[in-house]
Image (cartoon, rainbow, N blue to C red):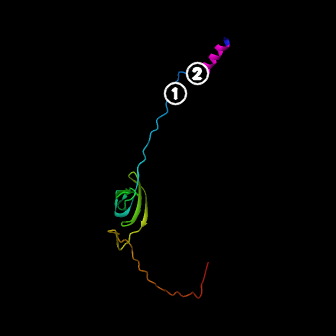
Amino acid sequence: MFKILISIFVVFALGGCSFFYKQPSKPKNIVVQKPAKSSIKGFIKDLTYEDGGYCYTIIAVDTKNSKLPSANFCANKYYYDKGDLVYATFVGRSLESMLLIREGSSSGKISGIKKPQNTINANRKNIKTKIEVPKEEHISF
């Protein structure tokens, strides 16, 4: 009988209050929705500098695979010029990347959008000067 009482006491001592303790429930998984990723392939129609950033207006050429028909956004970085064909990807409302597909021509029109002419024409003159070889040289210290 004494051995039974000691074994019951040892079980309660080692078990502690685990018989009466309620396990805390695991926190529920909170699902955070990632912002939607979208893209556009088109020409830069308008480019302005406002409030310390460059604001682009892109008109789409390709709207397959749920691409955007047009996009207006501002970026801190200058990417490409007006009239260039670009591929831009967005995460939510912010620009992720912009890739140049084809540079717009400076003289012609591409899809109704004329690229501004911002090239500098530098005419180099070929001036040939004849310099004679020195006949003697004096070095003094």
User: Which amino acid type corresponds to the residue marked 2 in the rendered image?
Assistant: Gly
Residue 88 appears in the rendering:
yes
Residue 78 seen by the camera: no
Residue with the most extreme front position: 64
The N terminus is located in which quarter? Answer: top right
The residues colored magenta run: 3-17
**Magenta stretch encompasses residue 4:** yes
The C terminus lies in which quarter of the figure? bottom right
How dense is the environment of label 2, judged by Cα within 10 Å: few (below 14), some, or many (20 and up)?
few
Looking at the picture, how far across and down is residue 137, in whole percent? Answer: 59, 84
Element at label 2? loop
> 26 above or below 137?
above
Q: Is residue 7 magenta?
A: yes
Classify 128 as above or below 114. Answer: below
Q: Residue furthest top?
A: 1
Query: How crowded is the residue under tag 1: few (<14 C-alpha within 10 Å), some, or many (20+)?
Result: few
From the image, tell me which residue sits under label 1.
Answer: 23
Q: Residue at x 43, y 47 (%)?
A: 34
The residues tagged by marks 2 and 1 sit, at their Cα atoms, a distance apart of: 14 Å
Give 66 or 43, whichever is nearer the viewer.
66
Secondary structure found at label 1: loop
Residue located at (41% from left, 59% from top) = 88
Place of residue 100 in the rendered image (x, y in percent of width and height, measured from the top left): 43, 64
Kindly identify which numbered label has been placed on residue 6: none
Instruction: Please identify the quarter of the rendering in which residue 41 is found.
Output: bottom left
Q: Earlier in the sequence, mark 2 or mark 1?
A: 2
Image: 26 above or below 8: below
Identify residue for label 2. 16
Residue at (62, 16) in percent of width and height: 8
Question: What kind of residue is marked 1?
Answer: Gln
